[in-house]
Image (cartoon, rainbow, N blue to C red):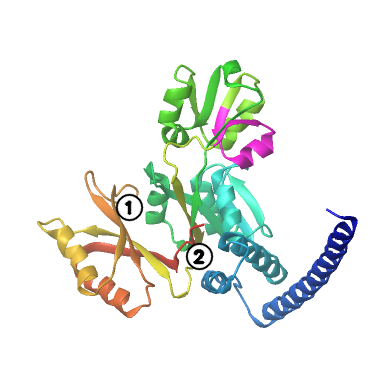
Amino acid sequence: MTRAHEQACEDELIRLRQRIDAVDGEILRLLSERGKIAQRIGEIKQGNLYRPEREAQVLRRIAAMNAGPLPEAAVRTIFREIMSACLALEQPLRIAYFGPAGTFTESAAKKHFGSAPEFFPYLTIDEVFRAVEANEADYGVAPIENSSEGSVGRTLDLLLQTPLKICGEINLRIHQNLMSKAESLAALTRLYSHAQSLAQCHEWLNRNLPHLPRVPVASNAEAARLAAEDATACAIAGEAAARLYDLNILAANIEDDPANTTRFVVLATHDAGPSGNDKTSFVCSAQNRPGAVHDLLAPLKEHGVSMTRFESRPARGFGGSRWEYVFFIDVEGHRTDAKVMAALEGMKPCVGFLKELGSYPKAIND
């Protein structure tokens, strides 16, 4: 490369950096303008200002407009943070989540709400529900099902009993990591993890650490905390827990299913309005007679409503006697859509009871 060419490249770099500085200034000006508009909206509106359906519409519209080079997931993350910061100017939010800090539920909550709200960890799913019911928190986040290990029974049981609604869902790809203060696998004497994570990594553990004692604990964050106190112990948890407790990741992405995903629900005193791409969840019981479940589901087919989830569960805590079951059902569409309304009305004569759990925007999968 000649000296002249080097100088030309250096001059171009200076011009490009000047352009970046100018673009950054324009971005800041527009962010300030957006913030002022958000503040004015907060002055005009009364009551709850968070609109899950509106945020879902904005994120879908922005993703559709994206021409690159930034990937859609990055664009959504940026705009999620912009909306989060602007909403905080209107209405600071308090978010309860199934903790402690460093859990996948915390990651899901921040994925959905951005980093601006206050996040409060609760050590049981019951406490998350109670915090929202008691107005200690505006919203709650709890796991409801995992693609490998199935449903979270306690969340389903509480949805059956609570007056709260589902106003959102989050799908989080779960990457399990083996972490420790130790520098290698050879130094390890015990493994801590939540029972579901142990199950999700069962085959990897059998191949790589078959003789290491496995100790189930209340959460992956608790497992990481215990590993941080003992240099010969290790834990299975997410990257957030490794950062929180300053642990070395000895093996990354050790889950047996590379598509391992957990679905979380957002709980509130309200559900969401129509966003144009929604789900509706409800729970019902079938009458005790032959063909009752078939008759219960027939209105969905009749009115062209697609069912995305059907699960039976003992009717504990809802006055059910032994061997009585309820059915948790998710369908595509909002409860105010004509075909969903018609299907739910058609089901009512066929059920012992029917409780709508909420309508909400479908989760965006990154």
Out of 117 and 79, give the one closest to the viewer: 79
Out of 106 and 352, give the one closest to the viewer: 106
Which of the 4 image quadrants contains residue 339?
bottom left
Tell me, yes or no, whether the highlighted magenta stretch contains residue 316.
Answer: no
**Residue range (magenta):** 235-252
The residue at the point 85 percent across, 59 percent down is 5
Query: At numbered mark 1, what does the secondary structure look like: helix, strand or loop?
Result: loop
Query: At numbered mark 2, what does the secondary structure look like: helix, strand or loop?
Result: loop
Tell me, yes or no, whether the highlighted magenta stretch contains residue 250.
Answer: yes
Out of 10 and 132, give the one closest to the viewer: 10
Residue, disc 1: 318
Q: Pinpoint residue 169: horizontal percent, then vertical percent.
A: 47, 59
Which of the 4 image quadrants contains residue 220?
top right
Query: How dense is the environment of label 2, judged by Cα within 10 Å: few (below 14), some, or many (20 and up)?
Result: some
**Label 2 with label 1: CB-CB less than 8 Å:** no
Query: How dense is the environment of label 1, judged by Cα within 10 Å: few (below 14), some, or many (20 and up)?
Result: few
Residue at the limit of the structure toward the bottom, as seen here: 44
Residue 134 makes an appearance in the image: no
Q: Which mark is residue 350?
A: none
What kind of residue is marked 2? Thr
The residue at the point 45 percent across, 33 percent down is 201
Residue 156 sits above or below residue 62 on the image? above
Residue, disc 2: 269
Residue at the limit of the structure toward the front, as seen here: 2
Residue 229 makes an appearance in the image: yes
